[in-house]
């Protein structure tokens, strides 16, 4: 896949997904389909452990962002994950975030790796601030 013209549009979500999850009665036997967007809507579904979650988005960069966040949750210490997200504002975080990405990159599919390798500014900014719609949000 050519990832040159892709960009993350939304890197955070502001929906209250917990209400949606409860209203839909998502549980271990459920199937769920969610628009990936900034990927924050997916995690409340994951907590309920449905049988299947279909996370879809017309923009592959949104899928790549979700996969990187998921691997960060799985494999980094909590403080490292927050740093990857861009929560901490200290020292040279861009270089630290790059090192954290390098720890995670081999767990990503080739297309996602190619995207982040070709768009290092997404990592450098911090994942919360990488979207073109959410990037202008001040820390």
Image (tube, rainbow, N blue to C red):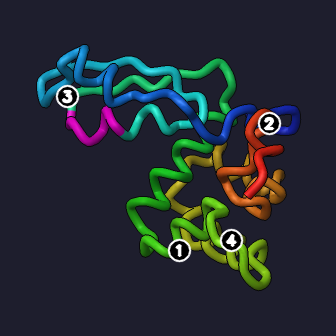
- Please state the horizontal and vertical placement of residue 106, each as a whole percent of the image: 55, 63
| Residue linked to disc 4 | 97
Q: Earlier in the sequence, mark 1 or mark 2?
A: 2
In 3D space, how far apart are the residues under numbered discs 3 and 2 (Cα atoms)? 30 Å
| Residue linked to disc 2 | 7
For discs 3 and 1, the disc positioned in front in the rendered view: 1
> Is the C-beta separation of discs 1 and 2 under 8 Å?
no
Q: Earlier in the sequence, mark 4 or mark 3?
A: 3
Looking at the rendered structure, the secondary structure element under dot 4 is helix
Farthest residue to the bottom: give it.
Answer: 91
Looking at the rendered structure, the secondary structure element under dot 1 is helix
Q: Main secondary structure of the magenta part?
A: helix
Q: In the drawing, does residue 66 fall left or right of residue 62?
A: left
Q: Earlier in the sequence, mark 4 or mark 1?
A: 1
Crowding at dot 3, Cα within 10 Å, few <14 / some 14-19 / many 20+, comes out as few
- Please state the horizontal and vertical placement of residue 73, each as a whole percent of the image: 42, 59
Placement of the N terminus among the 4 image quadrants:
top right
Q: Earlier in the sequence, mark 2 or mark 4?
A: 2
Q: Nearer the viewer, residue 55 or 81?
A: 81
| Residue linked to disc 1 | 80
Looking at the rendered structure, the secondary structure element under dot 2 is loop
In 3D space, how far apart are the residues under numbered discs 4 and 3 (Cα atoms)? 33 Å
**Does 98 sit above or below residue 6?**
below
| Residue linked to disc 3 | 51
> Is the C-beta separation of discs 4 and 1 under 8 Å?
no
- Please state the horizontal and vertical placement of residue 92, each as a whole percent of the image: 79, 81
Q: Earlier in the sequence, mark 3 or mark 2?
A: 2
């Amino acid at each position: 896949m050519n990832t040159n013209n892709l960009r993350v549009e939304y890197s955070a979500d502001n929906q209250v997904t917990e209400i949606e999850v409860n209203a839909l009665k998502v549980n271990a036997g459920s199937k769920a389909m969610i628009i990936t967007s900034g990927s924050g809507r997916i995690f409340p579904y994951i907590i309920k452990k449905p049988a299947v979650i279909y996370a879809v988005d017309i923009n592959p960069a949104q899928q790549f962002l979700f996969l990187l966040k998921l691997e960060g949750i799985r494999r980094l210490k909590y403080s490292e994950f927050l740093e990857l997200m861009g929560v901490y504002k200290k020292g040279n975080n861009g270089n630290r975030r790059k090192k954290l990405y390098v720890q995670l990159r081999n767990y990503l599919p080739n297309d996602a790796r190619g995207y982040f390798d070709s768009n290092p500014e997404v990592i450098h900014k911090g994942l919360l601030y990488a979207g073109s719609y959410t990037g202008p949000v001040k820390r």
